[in-house]
Image (cartoon, helix red, strand yellow):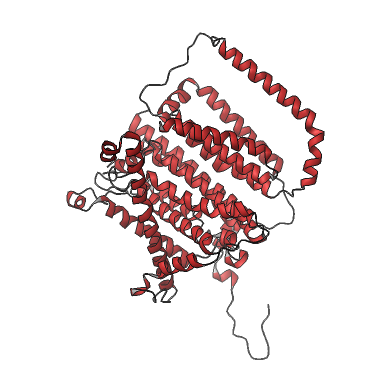
Amino acid sequence: MTEFFQSSLGMGWGWLVANLILILLIALPVMLSVAIVIYFDRKIWASMALRRGPNVVGPFGILQSFADALKVFLQETIIPSGANKGLFLIAPIITFTVALLSWAVIPFDQDMVLADINVGLLYIFAVSSLGVYGVMIAGWASNSKYPFFSALRAAAQMISYEVSIGFIIITVVMFTGSFNLNAIVEAQRGHGLGFINWYGFNLLLFPMAVMFLISSLAETARAPFDLTEAESELVAGYQTEYSSMAFALFWLGEYANVLLMCTLNALLFWGGWLPPVDWAPLYAIPGIFWLIFKISAFFFIFSWVKATVPRYRYDQLMRLGWKVFLPISLLWVFLVSGYLMLTRYGV
Amino acid sequence: MIQIFAFYLFASVVIASGAFTILARNPVHSVLWLILAFFNAAGLMILIGAEFIAMLLVIVYVGAVAVLFLFVVMMLDIDFAELRAGFMKNLPLGIALAAVLLAEMIFGIGAWQAGNIALGEHALNPARMGASNIEAVGELLYTRYIFLFEAAGLVLLVAMVGAIVLTHRKRAGVRPQNIASQVRRRPEEATRNTQPTVGEGVEL
Protein backbone atom coordinates (compact mmCIF):
# COMPACT_ATOMS: atom_id res chain seq x y z
CA MET A 1 0.00 0.00 0.00
CA THR A 2 2.88 2.33 0.79
CA GLU A 3 4.21 1.74 -2.72
CA PHE A 4 0.84 2.54 -4.28
CA PHE A 5 0.58 5.90 -2.52
CA GLN A 6 4.23 6.70 -3.10
CA SER A 7 3.82 6.15 -6.84
CA SER A 8 0.76 8.36 -7.03
CA LEU A 9 1.66 11.09 -4.50
CA GLY A 10 5.46 11.13 -4.46
CA MET A 11 7.79 9.63 -1.82
CA GLY A 12 7.18 11.81 1.22
CA TRP A 13 3.46 12.49 0.99
CA GLY A 14 2.70 8.98 -0.20
CA TRP A 15 4.45 7.55 2.85
CA LEU A 16 2.57 9.95 5.12
CA VAL A 17 -0.86 9.17 3.67
CA ALA A 18 -0.25 5.41 3.61
CA ASN A 19 0.91 5.39 7.22
CA LEU A 20 -2.00 7.53 8.39
CA ILE A 21 -4.39 5.05 6.80
CA LEU A 22 -2.53 2.12 8.38
CA ILE A 23 -2.62 3.81 11.79
CA LEU A 24 -6.38 4.27 11.47
CA LEU A 25 -6.68 0.65 10.34
CA ILE A 26 -5.09 -0.39 13.64
CA ALA A 27 -6.48 2.24 16.03
CA LEU A 28 -10.13 2.00 15.01
CA PRO A 29 -10.42 -1.80 15.36
CA VAL A 30 -8.56 -1.55 18.69
CA MET A 31 -11.10 1.00 19.95
CA LEU A 32 -13.98 -1.06 18.64
CA SER A 33 -12.64 -4.18 20.33
CA VAL A 34 -12.20 -2.19 23.54
CA ALA A 35 -15.91 -1.38 23.44
CA ILE A 36 -16.79 -5.04 22.85
CA VAL A 37 -14.31 -6.25 25.44
CA ILE A 38 -15.82 -3.97 28.09
CA TYR A 39 -19.18 -5.58 27.34
CA PHE A 40 -17.72 -9.08 27.65
CA ASP A 41 -15.87 -8.14 30.82
CA ARG A 42 -19.12 -7.04 32.42
CA LYS A 43 -20.95 -10.11 31.10
CA ILE A 44 -18.33 -12.56 32.39
CA TRP A 45 -18.11 -10.77 35.70
CA ALA A 46 -21.89 -10.82 36.02
CA SER A 47 -22.23 -14.51 35.24
CA MET A 48 -19.61 -15.39 37.82
CA ALA A 49 -21.62 -13.41 40.37
CA LEU A 50 -24.84 -15.09 39.16
CA ARG A 51 -26.18 -11.85 37.75
CA ARG A 52 -27.33 -11.06 34.24
CA GLY A 53 -25.08 -8.15 33.39
CA PRO A 54 -25.92 -5.66 30.63
CA ASN A 55 -28.92 -7.09 28.74
CA VAL A 56 -31.11 -4.16 27.77
CA VAL A 57 -29.46 -2.18 24.96
CA GLY A 58 -29.48 -4.14 21.71
CA PRO A 59 -29.57 -7.94 21.40
CA PHE A 60 -28.06 -9.47 24.58
CA GLY A 61 -27.10 -5.93 25.60
CA ILE A 62 -24.22 -5.91 23.16
CA LEU A 63 -24.68 -2.21 22.39
CA GLN A 64 -24.31 -1.25 26.06
CA SER A 65 -20.76 0.09 25.62
CA PHE A 66 -21.83 2.30 22.73
CA ALA A 67 -24.75 3.64 24.74
CA ASP A 68 -22.35 4.38 27.60
CA ALA A 69 -19.97 6.12 25.21
CA LEU A 70 -22.80 8.30 23.90
CA LYS A 71 -23.87 9.08 27.45
CA VAL A 72 -20.45 10.26 28.63
CA PHE A 73 -19.96 12.15 25.40
CA LEU A 74 -23.04 14.25 26.14
CA GLN A 75 -22.10 14.93 29.75
CA GLU A 76 -20.50 18.08 31.02
CA THR A 77 -16.76 18.02 31.80
CA ILE A 78 -16.48 19.23 35.36
CA ILE A 79 -13.12 20.69 36.36
CA PRO A 80 -12.69 21.18 40.13
CA SER A 81 -11.87 24.77 41.02
CA GLY A 82 -8.78 23.77 42.98
CA ALA A 83 -7.41 21.61 40.16
CA ASN A 84 -4.44 22.42 38.01
CA LYS A 85 -6.49 22.90 34.89
CA GLY A 86 -3.96 22.24 32.13
CA LEU A 87 -2.48 19.11 33.68
CA PHE A 88 -5.93 17.93 34.75
CA LEU A 89 -7.00 17.81 31.11
CA ILE A 90 -3.69 16.50 29.75
CA ALA A 91 -3.62 13.45 32.04
CA PRO A 92 -6.44 11.43 30.38
CA ILE A 93 -5.08 12.35 26.96
CA ILE A 94 -1.67 10.94 27.94
CA THR A 95 -3.22 7.70 29.22
CA PHE A 96 -5.27 7.25 26.08
CA THR A 97 -2.46 8.11 23.64
CA VAL A 98 0.10 5.92 25.35
CA ALA A 99 -2.34 3.02 25.34
CA LEU A 100 -2.59 3.27 21.55
CA LEU A 101 1.12 3.91 20.84
CA SER A 102 2.31 0.36 21.55
CA TRP A 103 0.09 -1.17 18.88
CA ALA A 104 2.42 0.20 16.21
CA VAL A 105 4.87 -2.68 16.66
CA ILE A 106 2.43 -5.54 17.31
CA PRO A 107 2.55 -8.14 14.51
CA PHE A 108 -1.01 -9.29 13.76
CA ASP A 109 0.14 -11.83 11.21
CA GLN A 110 3.33 -12.69 9.43
CA ASP A 111 4.77 -9.26 8.46
CA MET A 112 1.39 -7.65 9.17
CA VAL A 113 2.84 -4.92 11.34
CA LEU A 114 2.97 -1.14 11.05
CA ALA A 115 6.57 -0.65 12.21
CA ASP A 116 8.76 -3.75 12.00
CA ILE A 117 11.60 -2.30 14.10
CA ASN A 118 14.40 -4.36 15.59
CA VAL A 119 13.83 -3.00 19.10
CA GLY A 120 10.10 -3.76 19.04
CA LEU A 121 9.91 -5.33 22.48
CA LEU A 122 12.00 -2.55 24.03
CA TYR A 123 9.68 -0.03 22.40
CA ILE A 124 6.66 -1.66 24.02
CA PHE A 125 8.47 -1.75 27.35
CA ALA A 126 9.37 1.95 26.99
CA VAL A 127 5.87 3.02 26.01
CA SER A 128 4.17 0.99 28.72
CA SER A 129 6.43 2.63 31.29
CA LEU A 130 4.99 5.97 30.16
CA GLY A 131 1.49 4.86 31.08
CA VAL A 132 2.02 5.70 34.74
CA TYR A 133 2.32 9.41 33.96
CA GLY A 134 -1.34 9.71 33.07
CA VAL A 135 -2.26 8.32 36.48
CA MET A 136 0.32 10.33 38.39
CA ILE A 137 -0.50 13.63 36.71
CA ALA A 138 -4.22 13.00 37.17
CA GLY A 139 -3.72 12.28 40.84
CA TRP A 140 -1.64 15.35 41.48
CA ALA A 141 -3.57 17.77 39.28
CA SER A 142 -6.91 16.86 40.87
CA ASN A 143 -5.67 18.52 44.07
CA SER A 144 -7.65 16.09 46.14
CA LYS A 145 -6.51 13.54 48.70
CA TYR A 146 -7.83 10.26 47.33
CA PRO A 147 -6.51 10.79 43.79
CA PHE A 148 -3.18 11.79 45.28
CA PHE A 149 -2.87 8.59 47.33
CA SER A 150 -3.77 6.69 44.20
CA ALA A 151 -1.04 8.45 42.21
CA LEU A 152 1.58 7.56 44.81
CA ARG A 153 0.48 3.94 44.82
CA ALA A 154 0.48 3.80 41.03
CA ALA A 155 4.03 5.12 40.82
CA ALA A 156 5.41 2.56 43.25
CA GLN A 157 3.41 -0.31 41.78
CA MET A 158 4.35 0.27 38.14
CA ILE A 159 8.04 0.62 38.88
CA SER A 160 8.11 -2.51 41.03
CA TYR A 161 6.55 -4.74 38.44
CA GLU A 162 8.41 -3.28 35.48
CA VAL A 163 11.62 -4.63 36.99
CA SER A 164 10.44 -8.23 36.97
CA ILE A 165 8.74 -7.82 33.59
CA GLY A 166 12.08 -6.63 32.22
CA PHE A 167 13.84 -9.79 33.42
CA ILE A 168 11.05 -12.02 32.10
CA ILE A 169 11.32 -10.36 28.70
CA ILE A 170 15.09 -10.92 28.76
CA THR A 171 14.64 -14.69 29.10
CA VAL A 172 12.40 -14.72 26.02
CA VAL A 173 14.80 -12.50 24.12
CA MET A 174 17.71 -14.79 24.98
CA PHE A 175 15.84 -17.77 23.56
CA THR A 176 15.05 -15.85 20.39
CA GLY A 177 18.18 -13.77 19.95
CA SER A 178 16.18 -10.74 18.86
CA PHE A 179 13.98 -7.96 20.23
CA ASN A 180 11.86 -8.00 17.08
CA LEU A 181 8.37 -9.30 17.87
CA ASN A 182 8.01 -10.99 14.48
CA ALA A 183 11.26 -12.85 15.08
CA ILE A 184 10.09 -13.86 18.56
CA VAL A 185 6.89 -15.37 17.17
CA GLU A 186 8.75 -17.00 14.30
CA ALA A 187 11.25 -18.58 16.72
CA GLN A 188 8.38 -20.36 18.47
CA ARG A 189 7.51 -22.37 15.35
CA GLY A 190 8.06 -25.99 16.35
CA HIS A 191 9.75 -24.96 19.59
CA GLY A 192 8.20 -27.67 21.79
CA LEU A 193 9.08 -31.25 20.74
CA GLY A 194 9.42 -30.05 17.16
CA PHE A 195 5.73 -29.42 16.58
CA ILE A 196 4.25 -27.22 19.32
CA ASN A 197 4.43 -23.51 18.54
CA TRP A 198 4.65 -22.32 22.15
CA TYR A 199 7.45 -20.97 24.26
CA GLY A 200 5.19 -21.68 27.20
CA PHE A 201 5.51 -25.41 26.49
CA ASN A 202 9.20 -25.17 27.31
CA LEU A 203 9.62 -26.22 30.95
CA LEU A 204 12.23 -23.53 31.46
CA LEU A 205 9.98 -20.77 30.13
CA PHE A 206 6.64 -21.90 31.55
CA PRO A 207 7.23 -20.36 35.01
CA MET A 208 8.14 -17.14 33.24
CA ALA A 209 4.88 -17.30 31.29
CA VAL A 210 2.89 -17.59 34.53
CA MET A 211 4.85 -14.77 36.15
CA PHE A 212 4.39 -12.59 33.08
CA LEU A 213 0.63 -13.13 33.26
CA ILE A 214 0.56 -12.08 36.93
CA SER A 215 2.90 -9.15 36.31
CA SER A 216 0.78 -7.96 33.44
CA LEU A 217 -2.23 -7.95 35.78
CA ALA A 218 -0.21 -5.74 38.11
CA GLU A 219 1.12 -3.56 35.31
CA THR A 220 -2.37 -2.80 34.03
CA ALA A 221 -3.62 -2.30 37.62
CA ARG A 222 -6.33 -4.92 37.19
CA ALA A 223 -7.79 -6.86 40.07
CA PRO A 224 -6.33 -8.26 42.33
CA PHE A 225 -3.75 -5.48 41.99
CA ASP A 226 -6.18 -2.58 41.41
CA LEU A 227 -4.95 -0.63 44.41
CA THR A 228 -4.86 2.58 42.41
CA GLU A 229 -8.63 2.60 42.21
CA ALA A 230 -9.47 0.53 45.27
CA GLU A 231 -13.06 1.66 45.74
CA SER A 232 -13.24 0.53 49.36
CA GLU A 233 -10.39 2.86 50.35
CA LEU A 234 -9.91 5.52 47.69
CA VAL A 235 -13.42 6.14 46.27
CA ALA A 236 -12.26 5.72 42.65
CA GLY A 237 -8.59 6.55 42.97
CA TYR A 238 -7.13 8.90 40.40
CA GLN A 239 -10.43 9.05 38.50
CA THR A 240 -12.41 10.44 41.42
CA GLU A 241 -12.56 14.04 40.17
CA TYR A 242 -13.07 13.16 36.51
CA SER A 243 -16.28 13.18 34.57
CA SER A 244 -17.62 12.76 31.04
CA MET A 245 -15.12 12.33 28.17
CA ALA A 246 -12.05 12.80 30.39
CA PHE A 247 -13.23 9.86 32.48
CA ALA A 248 -14.04 7.87 29.35
CA LEU A 249 -10.53 8.38 28.00
CA PHE A 250 -9.11 6.82 31.18
CA TRP A 251 -11.55 3.96 30.83
CA LEU A 252 -10.71 3.33 27.17
CA GLY A 253 -6.99 3.66 27.77
CA GLU A 254 -7.14 1.19 30.62
CA TYR A 255 -8.91 -1.45 28.57
CA ALA A 256 -6.65 -0.83 25.55
CA ASN A 257 -3.73 -1.50 27.90
CA VAL A 258 -5.38 -4.70 29.13
CA LEU A 259 -5.82 -5.85 25.53
CA LEU A 260 -2.22 -4.98 24.80
CA MET A 261 -1.01 -7.04 27.74
CA CYS A 262 -3.17 -9.98 26.60
CA THR A 263 -1.60 -9.64 23.15
CA LEU A 264 1.89 -9.56 24.64
CA ASN A 265 1.17 -12.71 26.63
CA ALA A 266 0.04 -14.40 23.43
CA LEU A 267 3.01 -13.14 21.40
CA LEU A 268 5.78 -13.83 23.88
CA PHE A 269 4.83 -17.23 25.23
CA TRP A 270 1.93 -18.74 23.31
CA GLY A 271 2.95 -18.43 19.69
CA GLY A 272 1.22 -15.18 18.66
CA TRP A 273 -0.28 -15.59 15.20
CA LEU A 274 0.97 -19.17 14.85
CA PRO A 275 -1.50 -22.03 15.32
CA PRO A 276 -0.81 -24.02 18.50
CA VAL A 277 0.54 -27.03 16.59
CA ASP A 278 2.85 -26.92 13.58
CA TRP A 279 0.49 -28.89 11.34
CA ALA A 280 -0.21 -27.77 7.77
CA PRO A 281 -4.08 -27.72 7.75
CA LEU A 282 -4.12 -25.38 10.75
CA TYR A 283 -2.28 -22.76 8.69
CA ALA A 284 -5.37 -22.50 6.47
CA ILE A 285 -6.87 -20.27 9.17
CA PRO A 286 -5.28 -16.81 8.83
CA GLY A 287 -2.81 -15.97 11.58
CA ILE A 288 -4.75 -12.94 12.77
CA PHE A 289 -7.64 -15.21 13.83
CA TRP A 290 -5.29 -17.34 15.92
CA LEU A 291 -3.98 -14.18 17.54
CA ILE A 292 -7.47 -12.83 18.23
CA PHE A 293 -8.47 -16.21 19.66
CA LYS A 294 -5.47 -16.16 22.00
CA ILE A 295 -6.12 -12.55 23.03
CA SER A 296 -9.73 -13.45 23.85
CA ALA A 297 -8.59 -16.44 25.90
CA PHE A 298 -6.24 -14.23 27.90
CA PHE A 299 -8.90 -11.60 28.33
CA PHE A 300 -11.19 -14.27 29.73
CA ILE A 301 -8.48 -15.15 32.25
CA PHE A 302 -8.17 -11.46 33.16
CA SER A 303 -11.94 -11.20 33.77
CA TRP A 304 -11.98 -14.49 35.60
CA VAL A 305 -9.27 -13.27 37.97
CA LYS A 306 -11.11 -9.98 38.45
CA ALA A 307 -14.30 -11.80 39.38
CA THR A 308 -12.76 -14.30 41.78
CA VAL A 309 -9.60 -13.04 43.48
CA PRO A 310 -9.79 -10.63 46.42
CA ARG A 311 -7.70 -7.46 46.30
CA TYR A 312 -4.14 -7.52 47.60
CA ARG A 313 -3.07 -5.35 50.48
CA TYR A 314 -0.46 -2.76 49.56
CA ASP A 315 2.43 -4.34 51.48
CA GLN A 316 1.57 -7.75 50.04
CA LEU A 317 1.73 -6.26 46.56
CA MET A 318 5.19 -4.86 47.23
CA ARG A 319 6.30 -8.13 48.81
CA LEU A 320 5.18 -10.12 45.78
CA GLY A 321 6.94 -7.77 43.38
CA TRP A 322 10.25 -7.31 45.16
CA LYS A 323 10.69 -10.39 47.31
CA VAL A 324 9.15 -13.08 45.10
CA PHE A 325 9.10 -12.08 41.44
CA LEU A 326 12.36 -10.16 41.30
CA PRO A 327 14.59 -12.89 42.78
CA ILE A 328 12.88 -15.67 40.81
CA SER A 329 13.07 -13.85 37.49
CA LEU A 330 16.69 -12.87 38.15
CA LEU A 331 17.53 -16.50 38.96
CA TRP A 332 15.74 -17.55 35.78
CA VAL A 333 17.86 -15.21 33.68
CA PHE A 334 20.91 -17.10 35.00
CA LEU A 335 19.28 -20.48 34.42
CA VAL A 336 18.20 -19.69 30.87
CA SER A 337 21.54 -18.19 29.90
CA GLY A 338 23.33 -21.21 31.36
CA TYR A 339 21.01 -23.60 29.53
CA LEU A 340 21.51 -21.77 26.23
CA MET A 341 25.26 -21.69 26.83
CA LEU A 342 25.32 -25.48 27.25
CA THR A 343 22.93 -26.43 24.47
CA ARG A 344 23.15 -23.77 21.81
CA TYR A 345 26.52 -22.10 21.91
CA GLY A 346 28.77 -24.72 23.50
CA VAL A 347 30.89 -23.93 26.55
CA MET B 1 12.79 16.26 4.14
CA ILE B 2 10.89 14.61 6.97
CA GLN B 3 14.17 14.01 8.83
CA ILE B 4 14.97 17.71 8.78
CA PHE B 5 11.48 18.57 9.91
CA ALA B 6 11.67 15.96 12.68
CA PHE B 7 15.10 17.18 13.76
CA TYR B 8 13.98 20.78 14.13
CA LEU B 9 10.80 19.68 15.87
CA PHE B 10 12.63 17.51 18.42
CA ALA B 11 15.51 19.96 18.89
CA SER B 12 13.32 23.01 19.42
CA VAL B 13 11.07 21.11 21.83
CA VAL B 14 14.14 19.90 23.77
CA ILE B 15 15.45 23.45 24.10
CA ALA B 16 12.08 24.94 24.93
CA SER B 17 11.25 22.32 27.54
CA GLY B 18 14.76 22.63 28.97
CA ALA B 19 14.18 26.35 29.36
CA PHE B 20 10.77 25.81 30.93
CA THR B 21 12.31 23.30 33.34
CA ILE B 22 14.21 26.13 35.00
CA LEU B 23 11.63 28.84 34.35
CA ALA B 24 8.58 27.04 35.72
CA ARG B 25 7.48 28.29 39.13
CA ASN B 26 6.01 25.02 40.24
CA PRO B 27 8.54 22.17 40.84
CA VAL B 28 6.05 19.59 39.54
CA HIS B 29 5.78 21.50 36.27
CA SER B 30 9.58 21.62 36.17
CA VAL B 31 9.81 17.84 36.40
CA LEU B 32 7.15 17.40 33.72
CA TRP B 33 9.04 19.74 31.36
CA LEU B 34 12.19 17.75 32.13
CA ILE B 35 10.38 14.55 31.14
CA LEU B 36 9.33 16.16 27.87
CA ALA B 37 12.97 17.12 27.28
CA PHE B 38 14.10 13.51 27.91
CA PHE B 39 11.47 12.22 25.56
CA ASN B 40 12.43 14.52 22.73
CA ALA B 41 16.12 13.79 23.28
CA ALA B 42 15.19 10.15 22.66
CA GLY B 43 13.63 11.32 19.38
CA LEU B 44 16.94 12.95 18.43
CA MET B 45 18.76 9.68 19.22
CA ILE B 46 16.45 7.84 16.84
CA LEU B 47 17.24 10.37 14.12
CA ILE B 48 20.97 9.57 14.31
CA GLY B 49 20.19 5.84 14.14
CA ALA B 50 20.83 4.99 17.80
CA GLU B 51 17.45 3.39 18.47
CA PHE B 52 18.76 1.23 21.32
CA ILE B 53 20.06 4.24 23.24
CA ALA B 54 16.79 6.05 22.53
CA MET B 55 14.75 3.20 24.01
CA LEU B 56 17.04 2.98 27.04
CA LEU B 57 16.68 6.73 27.54
CA VAL B 58 12.91 6.39 27.61
CA ILE B 59 12.86 3.24 29.76
CA VAL B 60 15.44 4.34 32.33
CA TYR B 61 15.04 8.09 32.54
CA VAL B 62 11.44 8.70 31.59
CA GLY B 63 10.05 5.40 32.86
CA ALA B 64 11.91 5.05 36.13
CA VAL B 65 14.12 7.94 37.24
CA ALA B 66 11.68 10.71 36.40
CA VAL B 67 8.79 8.78 37.97
CA LEU B 68 10.69 8.69 41.26
CA PHE B 69 11.59 12.37 40.83
CA LEU B 70 7.94 13.21 40.35
CA PHE B 71 7.04 10.95 43.26
CA VAL B 72 9.25 12.98 45.60
CA VAL B 73 8.50 16.42 44.16
CA MET B 74 4.73 15.85 44.25
CA MET B 75 4.91 15.43 48.00
CA LEU B 76 6.84 18.66 48.54
CA ASP B 77 5.10 21.38 50.47
CA ILE B 78 5.76 24.26 48.11
CA ASP B 79 6.12 27.74 49.54
CA PHE B 80 6.41 30.10 46.59
CA ALA B 81 7.37 33.13 48.66
CA GLU B 82 10.29 31.28 50.19
CA LEU B 83 11.40 30.08 46.78
CA ARG B 84 11.52 33.62 45.49
CA ALA B 85 13.34 34.85 48.59
CA GLY B 86 16.17 32.42 47.90
CA PHE B 87 16.60 33.75 44.40
CA MET B 88 18.60 36.88 45.27
CA LYS B 89 20.72 34.97 47.78
CA ASN B 90 21.76 32.31 45.28
CA LEU B 91 22.13 34.67 42.32
CA PRO B 92 25.94 35.22 42.61
CA LEU B 93 26.55 31.47 42.85
CA GLY B 94 24.30 30.84 39.88
CA ILE B 95 26.06 33.47 37.78
CA ALA B 96 29.45 31.98 38.71
CA LEU B 97 28.30 28.51 37.64
CA ALA B 98 26.89 29.86 34.40
CA ALA B 99 30.17 31.65 33.68
CA VAL B 100 32.14 28.43 34.25
CA LEU B 101 29.80 26.51 31.93
CA LEU B 102 30.04 29.20 29.27
CA ALA B 103 33.86 29.23 29.46
CA GLU B 104 33.97 25.44 29.18
CA MET B 105 31.65 25.52 26.21
CA ILE B 106 33.83 28.09 24.45
CA PHE B 107 36.93 26.00 25.19
CA GLY B 108 35.22 22.86 23.98
CA ILE B 109 34.10 24.38 20.71
CA GLY B 110 37.55 25.96 20.23
CA ALA B 111 39.27 22.62 20.81
CA TRP B 112 36.86 20.90 18.47
CA GLN B 113 37.57 23.52 15.78
CA ALA B 114 41.32 22.95 16.22
CA GLY B 115 40.99 19.24 15.44
CA ASN B 116 40.70 16.27 17.78
CA ILE B 117 43.51 14.87 19.91
CA ALA B 118 44.91 11.36 19.38
CA LEU B 119 43.54 9.09 22.13
CA GLY B 120 46.31 6.51 22.72
CA GLU B 121 47.52 4.07 20.11
CA HIS B 122 44.43 1.85 19.94
CA ALA B 123 41.87 3.15 17.54
CA LEU B 124 38.35 2.55 18.71
CA ASN B 125 36.90 -0.68 17.36
CA PRO B 126 34.47 0.39 14.71
CA ALA B 127 31.09 -1.22 15.15
CA ARG B 128 30.44 -4.06 12.75
CA MET B 129 28.67 -2.69 9.74
CA GLY B 130 25.15 -3.90 9.14
CA ALA B 131 24.72 -5.15 12.69
CA SER B 132 21.78 -3.79 14.60
CA ASN B 133 22.38 -1.34 17.43
CA ILE B 134 21.95 -3.92 20.15
CA GLU B 135 24.36 -6.40 18.58
CA ALA B 136 27.00 -3.72 17.96
CA VAL B 137 26.74 -2.36 21.52
CA GLY B 138 26.79 -5.88 22.95
CA GLU B 139 29.85 -6.89 20.96
CA LEU B 140 31.84 -3.91 22.20
CA LEU B 141 30.49 -3.92 25.74
CA TYR B 142 31.10 -7.61 26.44
CA THR B 143 34.50 -7.90 24.78
CA ARG B 144 36.58 -4.76 24.67
CA TYR B 145 34.94 -2.89 27.56
CA ILE B 146 34.07 -5.87 29.74
CA PHE B 147 36.13 -4.70 32.71
CA LEU B 148 34.78 -1.16 32.58
CA PHE B 149 31.29 -2.61 32.26
CA GLU B 150 31.75 -4.88 35.26
CA ALA B 151 33.32 -2.06 37.25
CA ALA B 152 30.30 0.10 36.54
CA GLY B 153 28.09 -2.75 37.71
CA LEU B 154 30.13 -3.06 40.89
CA VAL B 155 29.85 0.66 41.60
CA LEU B 156 26.08 0.43 41.20
CA LEU B 157 25.96 -2.59 43.49
CA VAL B 158 27.92 -0.76 46.17
CA ALA B 159 25.64 2.25 45.83
CA MET B 160 22.60 0.02 46.16
CA VAL B 161 23.93 -1.78 49.23
CA GLY B 162 24.88 1.59 50.71
CA ALA B 163 21.40 2.98 50.17
CA ILE B 164 19.83 -0.05 51.83
CA VAL B 165 22.24 0.07 54.78
CA LEU B 166 21.58 3.78 55.30
CA THR B 167 17.81 3.55 55.24
CA HIS B 168 17.12 0.14 56.71
CA ARG B 169 16.49 0.09 60.41
CA LYS B 170 15.21 -2.57 62.70
CA ARG B 171 12.06 -1.33 64.35
CA ALA B 172 10.99 -2.85 67.63
CA GLY B 173 7.39 -3.69 68.31
CA VAL B 174 6.22 -4.37 64.78
CA ARG B 175 4.69 -7.70 63.85
CA PRO B 176 5.26 -8.21 60.14
CA GLN B 177 3.11 -10.68 58.29
CA ASN B 178 4.64 -14.14 58.06
CA ILE B 179 2.93 -15.65 55.08
CA ALA B 180 4.62 -19.05 55.44
CA SER B 181 3.30 -19.52 58.98
CA GLN B 182 -0.18 -18.40 57.91
CA VAL B 183 -0.23 -20.93 55.12
CA ARG B 184 1.10 -23.66 57.42
CA ARG B 185 -1.67 -23.15 59.93
CA ARG B 186 -4.25 -25.98 59.93
CA PRO B 187 -7.92 -25.77 61.00
CA GLU B 188 -7.28 -28.10 63.98
CA GLU B 189 -4.89 -25.59 65.57
CA ALA B 190 -7.17 -22.63 65.15
CA THR B 191 -10.68 -23.94 65.76
CA ARG B 192 -12.40 -26.13 68.31
CA ASN B 193 -15.72 -27.92 68.19
CA THR B 194 -17.63 -27.91 71.47
CA GLN B 195 -21.05 -29.06 72.62
CA PRO B 196 -21.87 -26.57 75.39
CA THR B 197 -24.73 -27.39 77.71
CA VAL B 198 -27.32 -24.64 78.07
CA GLY B 199 -26.54 -22.07 80.75
CA GLU B 200 -22.91 -23.06 81.27
CA GLY B 201 -21.20 -21.33 78.38
CA VAL B 202 -17.79 -22.30 77.11
CA GLU B 203 -14.30 -21.68 78.40
CA LEU B 204 -12.26 -19.48 76.09
Can residue A42 be seen here?
yes
User: To which quarter of the image does residue B5 belong?
Assistant: top left
Can residue B52 be seen here?
no
Q: Position of residue A286 (x, y in %)?
A: 23, 51
The structure residue drawn at horizontal position 50% and vertical position 23%, both measured from the top left corner, is B146
Q: Residue furthest front?
A: A9
Q: Position of residue A1 (x, y in %)?
A: 27, 42
- As rendered, which of A52 and A175 lies closer to the eye? A52
User: To which quarter of the image does residue A239 belong?
Assistant: bottom right
The structure residue drawn at horizontal position 35% and vertical position 35%, both measured from the top left corner, is A12
Q: Residue furthest bottom?
A: B198
User: To which quarter of the image does residue B164 belong?
Assistant: top right
- As rendered, which of A180 and B42 lies closer to the eye? B42
Q: Position of residue A210 (x, y in %)?
A: 42, 52
Lateral position of residue A276 relative to residue A51, left or right: left
The structure residue drawn at horizontal position 59% and vertical position 85%, both measured from the top left corner, is B195
Q: Where does the C terminus of chain A fall, quadrant-wise? A: top left
Image mark count: 0
- As rendered, which of B191 and B84 lies closer to the eye? B84
Q: Is residue B204 above or below residue A324?
A: below
Q: Is residue A124 above or below residue B140?
A: below
Q: Position of residue B163 (x, y in %)?
A: 67, 39
